[in-house]
Structure formats: C-alpha cells, structure tokens
Amino acid sequence: MRKLFFWFPMTVFLLLIWMLLANALSIGQFILGSILSLGLVLGSQRLRPLLGHPKKTLTILKLFFMVIADIAYSNWIVGILILQGKSAHRTPGFINIPLDIRDPHGLAILSCIITYTPGTVWSGLTEDDFILRLHVLNLKEESEWIHTIKDRYEANLMEIFE
C-alpha cells in the first residue's frame, strides 16, 4: 500500500509536468507522458533502497511555513548587507554544531534548508560524531545560530522522521 501511495502521486505530478512542457492537450501526448512518467517512477524505485516514512503532517506544514518565513527574512537581511557595501560590518565565520538527528532523510532536508537560506552554507558533516560545519555570512552570535539550527529545524525534523 505504501508503494502505491508513493508512485501514484509522483506519476500524476510528472504527467502534469510533461503536459505543461509539451504545451499540447492531445491524447498522444497524454499517453506518451503517462508511459514516460510511470516508467521513470518505477525505474527510480530501484535507485532508492532506503525509503523515508515521514510522520506528523502538522509538523511538516509548520516546518514548511517556518522555513519559507526564514528564507524571506534572510533574503531581506542579506539584501540590506549587500546594499550597504563596505560600510556593512559583516563578520563571516564557521560554526560547529553537534547534531542529534541520524535519519538520512532528515539530514538531507536539513542540508537543503540551510543551503536554501541566503547567508548560510552547509560546509560539512563529520561521519563519526555528526558535527555540522556551517558557514554564516554575518556571524555575530554563535548561540543564536545554534539555537536556530537545533531548536527550529532539527527538533522538527526529528519529530517528523524519528
């Protein structure tokens, strides 16, 4: 049943993308798009041996809107720093943050969140003790960044995946 839940929405999504890219509503394009999207979804399942099983839909929605708000705010702050030019007293730096999350899907999403947010870059993760190395464009207070990563993102991702 879980496989059905995975492949059906993905097939419909890929078919929709195919129809938009083809820019034609015809039976031929629909059949071709259906065959290609179903083939891609079934073929990609063999490439992904470890499946994620997210839980807590409300936490997913909360995290999604929190990340959107943080990205918008970070865009605003980075834009101001860029417009200020050399008069902006930027202090770039690296932070090491110990992570508690071990789920590979949660770690992948955390890396995407960090990298999508302007002014931050995921620059490494140690394999032994899961210490995240984070580069920040304007590092003023390390504890603020640690709080943001651990309490806002990691806690929600652990609730979703672990």
Image (cartoon, rainbow, N blue to C red):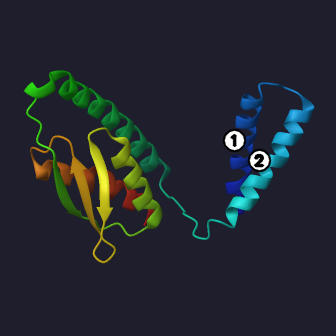
Q: Find residue 13 and name its label.
A: 1
- Three-letter residue code for mark 1: Phe
Per the model, the C-alpha gap separating discs 2 and 1 is: 8 Å
- As displayed, is residue 10 above or below residue 155? above
- Three-letter residue code for mark 2: Ser
Report x, y in % for residue 19. Answer: 77, 32
Of residue 38 and residue 123, the one placed in the foreground of this image is: 123
Quadrant housing residue 150: bottom left
Report x, y in % for residue 102. Answer: 38, 70
Dot 1: element: helix
> Mark 2, mark 1: which one is toward the viewer?
2
Report x, y in % for residue 35. Answer: 85, 48
Left or right placement of residue 127 versus residue 138 in this view: right
Q: Residue furthest top?
A: 83
Of residue 68 and residue 156, the one placed in the foreground of this image is: 68
* Identity of the residue drawn at 91% across and 32% down: 27
The residue carrying mark 2 is 37
* Identity of the residue drawn at 72% across and 54% down: 7
User: Label 1 near label 2: C-beta < 8 Å?
Assistant: yes
